[in-house]
Amino acid sequence: MMDEFEVNIQVPAPELQSDIISVTGLATHLDHAKEGLLERIKELQAEQEDRALGQLEAPITVDPKYHPKIIARKGAIITQIHTDHDVNIQFPEKYDENQDQISINGYEQNAIAACDAIQGIVDELEEIISEDITLDSRVHACIIGARTKGIHKIMDEFKVDLRFPQSGAADPNLVTVTGRPEMVDEAIDHLLNLEQECMADVVENEAKMAYMKPSGTAAANPEEPRGPSK
């Protein structure tokens, strides 16, 4: 700094326990030297605070089945935690021995806050239940809606996951609702109401189809033309 600002800087010896630094030189150089010195002091104080805070590696134990939920689609949730708390979060590699260990690195208070955020997600996930209900398979398409808009609306509104049976399932009427208990109950009530509404349309359409369908007997035995009377 002395070369940079063309001044002489005298720092007291540690045993003197003095906080006075002397700066001598041309008057035109002193102001710049003082500004530079104060800026350097701020940097040193910041570094000292960083060392005082210290870096912490905080492992948190989380069942591997919850890892995808914590990461979320396109890493949305884990990225948010990283951004909010300024920490690095490392999930176990495929062949790591401790598959349930998530490692969090950062300043102590940040790492602890990130751990708390992850634990909060786990606590919510552990409350989640799955319940099977019977919905007539004839109304599934009505509930799912065009381009699955209907089912996504329900999942967003009640914060649940819905699983309809695949083609050829043992029970084509079985629908699974997954979410927090109170939301699952509300979603099921809503689905049962939709079933009644959709079933009315299904029955009406089936009645129309039956009415329009030609009689099997008439089609099999068309009336033969009669010959001329003798």
Image (spheres, rainbow, N blue to C red):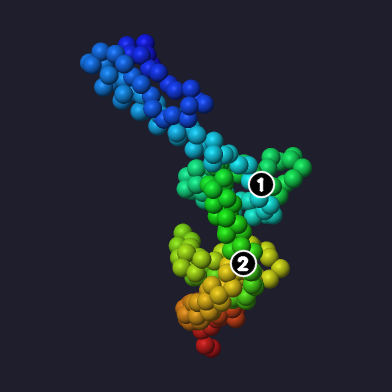
Give the label on residue 59, or none.
1
Residue 85 locus on image (x, y percent): 50, 47
Residue furthest out toward the left: 28
Disc 2 residue type (three-letter): Ile
Quarter of the picture containing the N terminus is top left
Left or right: 116 in relation to 94? left
Q: Residue at x 48, y 32 (%)?
A: 47
Quadrant assignment, res 120: bottom right
Left or right: 131 in relation to 156? right
Disc 1 residue type (three-letter): Pro
Q: Residue at x 47, y 48 (%)?
A: 84
Instruction: Determine if residue 70 is in view.
Output: no
Q: Is residue 131 above or below residue 207?
A: above
Residue 86 locus on image (x, y percent): 50, 43
Q: Is residue 206 above or below residue 25?
A: below
Residue furthest out toward the front: 16
Q: Is residue 173 above or below residue 122?
A: below
Of residues 218 and 28, the one drawn nearer to the viewer in this rendering: 28
Residue 180 locus on image (x, y percent): 57, 69
Of residues 91 and 146, the one drawn nearer to the viewer in this rendering: 91
Mark 2 lies on residue = 128
How crowded is the residue under tag 1: few (<14 C-alpha within 10 Å), some, or many (20+)? Answer: some
Residue furthest out toward the right: 97
Label 2, secondary structure: give it: loop
Give the label on residue 134, or none.
none
Left or right: 75 in relation to 168? left
Q: Residue at x 54, y 39 (%)?
A: 52
Residue 99 locus on image (x, y percent): 72, 46
Q: CA distance from mark 2 to mark 1?
A: 24 Å
